[in-house]
Amino acid sequence: MALALSWAGAASGQAYIDLTPTDGTLVQDNWVYLESKGYDLTPLVDIELSAAEWWLTLTSADTISARLYDTATSTLLASGTVVTGNGTEDWYYSEIDYALLTGVQYTIAFHCPTCNGSQGPVMDRKSSATQDFTVPGYFEMVHSRSTSSDAKPTSSNVWFPFMRVYEGSADNDAPIISVPGTLQAVEDEPLAITGFSVRDIDAQGEDLQIELWADEGTLSLTMVSPSGLAFTKGDGTNDAKLTFSGSISALTAAFETVTYIGPAEWSGTDTIYIEADDLGNTGTGGPQSAADSVVVEVASKNDAPVITTPNAQSTNEDVPLEIAGITIEDVDLGDERIEVSLQADTGTITLAKTNKLSFSSGDGD
């Protein structure tokens, strides 16, 4: 189906098309036409803002780009591709890809730092070259122009951009997990890790459930108060395994730094695992999940020997004293040799056994 609209003379107006799109339908308002696409895009509204279409004369020093704002907060959500002028009067096109949420009002604005009145409207956040729209449950496209009948816009005659809107089915999209690459740690030392993140395009503020664990070591999250997390396993501090839920913003804060530490006196290869479940909050198809993992190489370090001695001993004059309970341990020595020095302030020392020992001073007898 194609619908062509035009105005003549001093007339002005708007063109509307109301529809309930099928999966993957592309709705474009540039004049208005429908084009079938053979794939499904979600969430409920996944919009590609093909903005802006402006007929201007821009020099090679001029650049123009579209911008998308949250109308209520004036927060910049996305910036479009930057287009450079070609020195002639032409259409200039900047594209934004952004997933919009149903019921939220957005503003499309245009940014041209060097544009002036002779070249067309000054296109920035505060100019009149903006268009507000709200994404409803169905999609209503509006194409509008000013009261001027000119075919080309001027500083007082503004054409608003067209939008390509993909109205997907309400299928539930799985979360997306990001993890860092292979990590390098040191025995008995905590490792601060950045690079963990979880996204879910159709979470719409609802909670996701996370499972996080390591084969050997323990993990701690960045804990703020209030954390916005609900734990069913662990508490976020030195846990072998954690199970918790929270919004995307709460999870992002918790993952700002994940701290890993291996078991005491342990070195080797460990693996950290993460699973995310969206709990089926939006869309059809039930809960969706994702999983990933990261390897941690824990390097050994040289630990000092540990000496154990008995309590104070006593004996009579000229009577030998057998002393038991002297031990030496070194957790990372293995089969390597160790050097030991024994010395008495006034007496002499005899060892019970001397086989497999080599002496640099004395002979043990």
Image: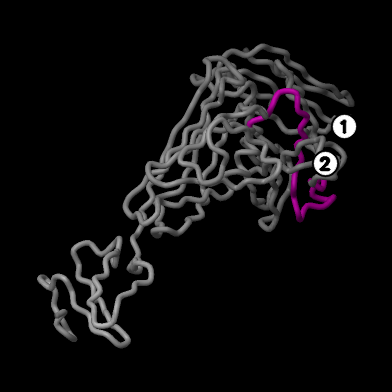
Decide: few, some or many residues near mark 2? Use Cα within 10 Å; few <14, some 14-19, many ≥20. Answer: some
Q: Residue at x 64, y 19 (%)?
A: 33
Instruction: Determine whether, in the image, residue 310 is placed left or right of residue 174.
Output: left
| Residue assigned mark 1 | 148
Task: Find residue 13 and report its horizontal and vertical position in percent.
Answer: 84, 22
Q: Mark 1 or mark 2, which is nearer the start of the sequence?
A: 1
Q: Can residue 35 be seen in the rendering of this structure?
A: no
Identify the secondary structure beneath mark 2. Answer: loop
Q: Residue at x 77, y 40 (%)?
A: 109
**Callout 2 amino acid:** Thr
> Which region is colored magenta?
99-123
Q: Can residue 155 be seen in the rendering of this structure?
A: yes
Task: Find residue 292 and report its horizontal and vertical position in percent.
Answer: 43, 37
Identify the secondary structure beneath mark 1. Answer: loop
Instruction: Determine whether, in the image, residue 16 is placed left or right of residue 312.
Output: right
Relative to 225, does residue 201 appear above or below in the rendering? above
Instruction: Determine whether, in the image, residue 240 is placed left or right of residue 5.
Output: left
- Residue 209 or residue 65, whichever sits in front: 209
State which quarter of the image contains the N terminus. top right
State which quarter of the image contains the C terminus. bottom left
Task: Find residue 352 and report its horizontal and vertical position in percent.
Answer: 16, 71
| Residue assigned mark 2 | 154
Secondary structure mainly formed by the magenta segment: loop
- Residue 344 or residue 201, whichever sits in front: 344
